């Protein structure tokens, strides 16, 4: 993805998120994205479906979909960090997730991987955040 394309995508996402009261974070590296969307359930679901249908996105995978007590990225309509490939691979390695169907069968209290992934996303956004 070119810098221009990435910048346009980010500006569009931020504008839409502000209108829809969605917050979150987007990390880009190694030619891939990882994103967290926070907001009202129906609004986030509609946004996710829009992302899935967008022809610019390929092989979209939902890793976690659950209610949260508080937003982790409440101050950003879309925090963004572009990271080196090695850092993105570290983030991806945390997602030792199964398929969404297998995730649904896990006990609701089994959130260790989710917490590690969220913590790593926060760390990366703080370290690599770009305005």
Image (cartoon, rainbow, N blue to C red):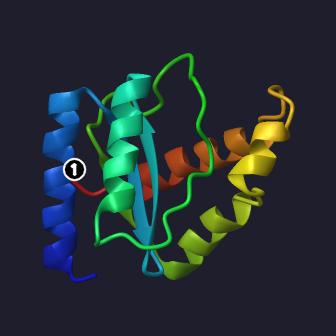
**What percent of the width, then of the height, locates residue 127?**
44, 56
Q: In the depicted view, which residue is nearer to us: 90 or 41?
A: 41
Residue plotted at (48% across, 80% down): 30
Look at the picture and state if 99 lies above or below 71.
Answer: below
Residue plotted at (33% across, 60% down): 53
What is the quadrant of residue 129 in the picture?
Answer: bottom left
Quarter of the image with the N terminus in it: bottom left
Q: In the depicted view, which residue is nearer to us: 131 or 110?
A: 110
Q: How crowded is mark 1: few (under 14 residues within 10 Å), some or many (20 or more)?
A: some
**What percent of the width, then of the height, locates residue 112?**
79, 39
Q: In the depicted view, which residue is nearer to us: 126 or 112?
A: 112
Residue plotted at (43% across, 49% down): 126
For label 1, the residue is 13
Q: Is residue 130 left or right of residue 4?
A: right
Residue plotted at (57% across, 23% down): 67
**What percent of the width, then of the height, locates residue 2?**
22, 83
């Amino acid at each position: 993805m070119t810098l221009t394309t990435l910048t346009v995508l980010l500006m569009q996402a931020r504008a839409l998120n502000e209108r829809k009261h969605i917050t979150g974070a987007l990390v880009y590296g190694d030619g891939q994205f990882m994103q967290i969307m926070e907001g009202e359930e129906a609004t986030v679901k509609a946004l996710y479906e829009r992302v899935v249908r967008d022809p610019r996105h390929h092989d979209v995978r939902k890793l976690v979909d659950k209610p949260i007590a508080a937003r982790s990225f409440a101050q950003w309509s879309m925090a963004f960090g572009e990271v080196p490939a090695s850092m993105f691979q570290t983030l991806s390695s945390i997602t030792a997730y199964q398929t969404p169907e297998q995730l649904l069968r896990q006990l609701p209290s089994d959130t260790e991987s989710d917490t590690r992934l969220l913590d790593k996303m926060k760390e990366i956004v703080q370290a690599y955040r770009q305005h």
